Image (spheres, helix red, strand yellow):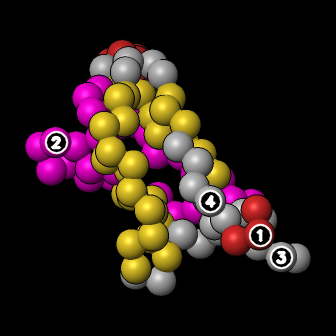
Amino acid sequence: MAVVLGASVKAQGTAGSVFGHGPAGGEVTVTSSTGAQRHATISSSGRYTISPVPTGVWTVALSTGGQAVDTRKNIPVTVGRGAQIDFACPNDQCAQAK
């Protein structure tokens, strides 16, 4: 148990996160200057979180249906902090209709 907990604390001490809102079902990809990538699918409520994301400067991209929609460059990720990146949604409605 102590080993798992220790590893968790270490990961949190060297990483941050990227989170925000976007069109439900969209795919968010963060890419570092070294080419490392992390991915998340935007939930039905229109939210996403990618964590842990190592510190550094990242590009955050949104795609829907396999097509690139929007890209944000030079997003800094710092230790223990989140970078909020929101993407526009059709008619300002990010969540899926119920």
| Quarter-of-image position of residue 34 | top left
Dot 4: element: loop
Q: Residue furthest bottom?
A: 65
Dot 1: element: helix
Viewer-side label of 1, 3: 1
The residues bearing labels 2 and 3 have C-alpha atoms spaced at a distance of 37 Å
Whether 50 is among the magenta residues is yes
Looking at this view, is 50 or 3 the one in front?
Answer: 50
Q: Residue at x 83, y 76 (%)?
A: 97
Viewer-side label of 1, 2: 1
Residue indicated by mark 3? 97
User: Would you say the residues marked 4 and 2 are in contact, meaning their CB atoms lie under 8 Å apart?
Assistant: no
Whether 96 is among the magenta residues is no
Q: Residues within 10 Å of mark 2 (few under 14, many from 20)?
A: few
Left or right placement of residue 78 versus residue 35 in this view = right
Residue indicated by mark 1? 91
Q: Residues within 10 Å of mark 4 (few under 14, many from 20)?
A: some
Residue 88: give its label. 4
Dot 2: element: loop
Residue 32: give its label. none
Q: Residue furthest right?
A: 98
Residue 32 rendering spot, x and y as whole percentages: 22, 43
Q: Tell me the chief SS of the magenta region.
A: strand
In the image, residue 16 above or below residue 80:
below
Q: Residue at x 87, y 76 (%)?
A: 98
Residue indicated by mark 2? 33
Q: Amino acid at mark 2?
A: Ser
Magenta part of the chain: 30-58
